[in-house]
Amino acid sequence: MGSCAECSTWVYGGQLTNGCPPVYTSSSHIVVLKFAGLVGHNRKISSLKIGGRRRRRMIVNAAAEKLQKGIAELYDESSGIWEDIWGDHMHHGFYDPGSDVSESDHRLAQIRMIEESLRFASVSDDSADNSLQKPRKIVDVGCGIGGSSRYLARKYKAECRGITLSPVQAQRAQALAAAQGLVGKVSFQVADALNQPFPDGKFDLVWSMESGEHMPDKAKFVHELARVAAPGGTIIIITWCHRDLSPSEESLTPQETALLNKICDAYYLPAWFSIADYIKLLQSLSLEDIKAADWSEFVAPFWPAVIRSALTWRGITSLLRSGWKTMKGALAMPLMVEGYKKGLIKFAIITCRKPAS
């Protein structure tokens, strides 16, 4: 924890906790405000000093709204292409380390990612004779086109609610639920994960599969996950992180920051957290049974496989029909491979439970 030398705002794990957007270092590119047209830290600070706290809040809110708009448009454009090539699970697959997987294995690997995540969190298996421990009400935060929601609803015979920023995703997720006979069991809506439209303590499984990296306020994100979790409920966060900092480090290296900023620009991401940052947040909320792991070695084949699929005739023609945001995301895929190979990007699972009372 420290403060920015230029604006004296407190920084926790790469995120300004008083409402300012996240940064990597005080001199670095500010990802959230970049989308509002304020590119450099010094320019942003001068703007904030002029109008004080109220102006700062207005600028941050405008930046967050623009970021959300970019995320929604990215997934509005790209979800149909993804489903056509990869199916309805819009997330990494789980592979044996060093495995050489064929294209036909990837959808099975995505199902395995769900199962391994549930196992890691010690969520009751559907075949076990302990039905009272099975999740009955589930929320899928950042649901994509609802692949996880429908899978979990069938597995546990549970009710599942999915939220996404993308109207196209929500509509497609609902259509797939209807086609699979899940009307009344699964529903989807456009909603903000930082302000979820659910009452406190509603869900006994809170599921977030690769959506945390899009959240501009990680503290508020985790707080909302905990708020909607029922007493004794399980929270599962699977997300992209940057590497943990060593005790002697105050920030990532300039080269690492530059690489992450390029990825953020392509995929509409604010600043990243480390696994250690997430654990500190969960501890600050007095959540229990906190566990975390780096699963980077288990997802290693994923991005090379996505790149190969994009370079097929089917992939190329689909990209050419898509919008610029999808094209920019495709061009950035080698950067993800580079980040994993350099040990900068970590594929993390973090789980915990809300106290029963």
Image: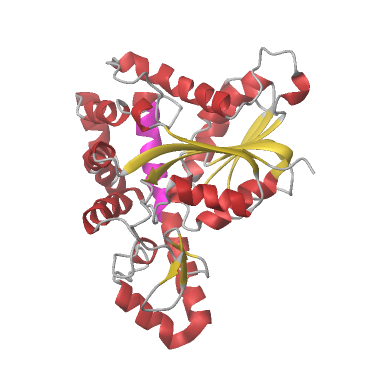
Q: Splitting the image into 4 quarters, where does residue 252 fall? A: bottom left
Is residue 241 highlighted in magenta? no
Image spot of residue 37 (x, y percent): 33, 69
Magenta stretch bounds: 70-84
**Placement of 354 over or under 186, stated as above or below:** below
**Placement of 152 over or under 232, stated as above or below:** above
Q: Residue at x 33, y 59 (%)?
A: 251
Is 132 on the left or on the right of 284, as rendered? right
Q: Residue at x 53, y 80 (%)?
A: 54
Q: Residue at x 39, y 73 (%)?
A: 4
Q: Splitting the image into 4 quarters, where does residue 83 fall? A: top left
Tell me which secondary structure the magenta stretch mostly adopts: helix
Image spot of residue 115 (x, y percent): 53, 22
Image spot of residue 82 (x, y percent): 37, 31
Q: Splitting the image into 4 quarters, where does residue 104 fall? A: top left
- Towards the viewer: 81 or 104: 104
Number of numbered discs visible in the structure rendering:
0
Is residue 208 visible to the viewer in this orientation of the structure? no
